[in-house]
Image (tube, grey):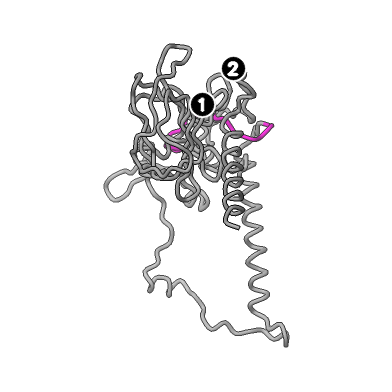
Amino acid sequence: MERMKKILAFCFCMLFVLTLILSCSTYSSYGQKAPAKGVYHKIKKGETFWSIARAYQVKLQELAEVNNISNPELIEEGSVLFIPAVNQVIDDVMTAAKAMDAQTKAASSDIGTNIKTSADYNGATGEKKISPVTVTTDKLKTANVKPEEETTPKGVTGAGKPAGEKAQPKIKKKSPAEEKDEVRFEKRRFIWPVRGSVKTRFGIQPNKTYYNWIKIASVAGMKVKAAASGIVIFSAKLKDYGETIIIRHEDNYATVYTHLKKRYVKTDQNIKKGEEIALLGEVDEAGSVYMNFEVRLKGKARNPLFFLP
């Protein structure tokens, strides 16, 4: 029985590793880069990062990570965004975004009507129920619950409206959906695996290919450290990726380290954050010593720069 449990655990672990490995890259084979699936959208006057995301029905977080956008409010007219997993460019983003907002509002209204119908009437007698509590604006004020207020992002300037004696920057009012949907960072979740510079960023590349990793250039002999505590679920040489290590972390995260010179850890080994796990030394076409680093959540590649300090 105990042996059977170990076999099942091993099979589950290998399945998890294979899932990560197969999705590590859009390379069909070494040196043959697969084109990224999606379209390029040129930002027009009046469009916002939020309206573009809603129009294309793409999560704001995903759109930001793919395009390495740290501040969506600073996008400029005429610049280009890559929209993943779509096959057609939307010419009128604002109209499409409004249509999506209307659909969302209608869906919410239908849900509210259904809830009211089931809550206000007695299923047995058909008689209308009397709600024991009615929440009013006065009660909200008494409870010190303030309505949503328009925020003024830092670093944004424009024509101002008078506020007292001073003119304040005019900020385009966000919709309720925009106020709730923000780009999030977890800068303290991981540490840098190695000291160096980011030579290639995550996401869409100038040659229209898509990378699931960041490429860090460093020096030969530099020690690679575990980005967080966890357990090694893969440690071996992998075709097209060289010496590779995959570490599973809490909250369904995993980190992948490829193109290493030498590995110091074995599969099933518990690793502490900052512990040395490998050595650098592999060289790219330009003669730079490097490694590739990935962050994955439930098997899906995420932008490492959104998680590194």
Residue 206 in percent (x, y) is at 53, 20
Judge whether 114 appears above or below 95 on screen. below
Residue at horizontal 57 percent and vertical 27 percent from the top = 210
Nearer-the-camera pick, 3 or 160:
3
Q: Which mark is residue 79?
A: 1
Q: Which mark is residue 200?
A: none
Disc 2 or disc 1, which is closer to the eye?
2
Asked whether, in this view, residue 254 is left or right of residue 55, the answer is left
Q: Single out the residue that lies furthest toward the top.
A: 286
- CB contact under 8 Å: marks 2 and 1: no
Q: Which mark is residue 31?
A: 2
Q: Single out the residue that lies furthest toward the left.
A: 165
Query: Helix, strand or loop at disc 1?
Result: loop
What type is the residue that disc 1 sits on?
A: Ser
Label 1 crowd (10 A; few <14 / some 14-19 / many >=20): few
Question: Going from the N terminus, do you reach mark 2 or mark 1 first?
Answer: 2
